[in-house]
Image (cartoon, rainbow, N blue to C red):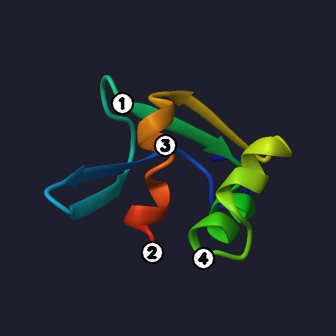
Amino acid sequence: MSGPQGGQWWIDVEDGKYKMGKGKIDNPNVTFVAKDKDWVAVSNHQMGGTWAYLTGRLRIRGDQGLARKLGEIFP
């Protein structure tokens, strides 16, 4: 994430539970790139993830199918 609250963050999801932390992990399945304010807007459902992607506010690298499940992690 870029911006004042930016940096590298990770989310590990397993068996319906998730852990989050700051930093980088090796070999992520999917990587999201966004400004901090846009990521917060997507996670709080103030901006749709699809809209963010289509307008270039959210870039996705890696497993696109897994990326589409983001809404299941943050319902």
* Residue 7, above or below 20: above
* Residue 27, above or below 20: above
Q: For label 1, count other residues whose C-alpha is less than 10 Å away and answer few (under 14), some (14-19) or many (20+).
A: few
Which residue is drawn at the image coordinates 47% and 55% (left, top)? Answer: 70
The disc labelled 3 sits on which kind of residue?
A: Ala
Task: Identify the residue under disc 1.
Answer: 29
The disc labelled 4 sits on which kind of residue?
A: Asn
For residue 67, the mark is: 3
Select label 4 or label 3 by which is in front. 3
* Residue 45, above or below 18: below
Select label 2 or label 1 by which is in front. 2
Label 3: which secondary element: helix
- N-terminal of the two: label 4 or label 3? 4
- Label 4 with label 3: CB-CB less than 8 Å: no
The disc labelled 1 sits on which kind of residue?
A: Asn
Label 4 and label 3: CA atoms lie apart by: 16 Å
- N-terminal of the two: label 1 or label 3? 1
Label 2 and label 4: CA atoms lie apart by: 9 Å
Task: Identify the residue under disc 2.
Answer: 75
Image spot of residue 50 (x, y percent): 70, 52
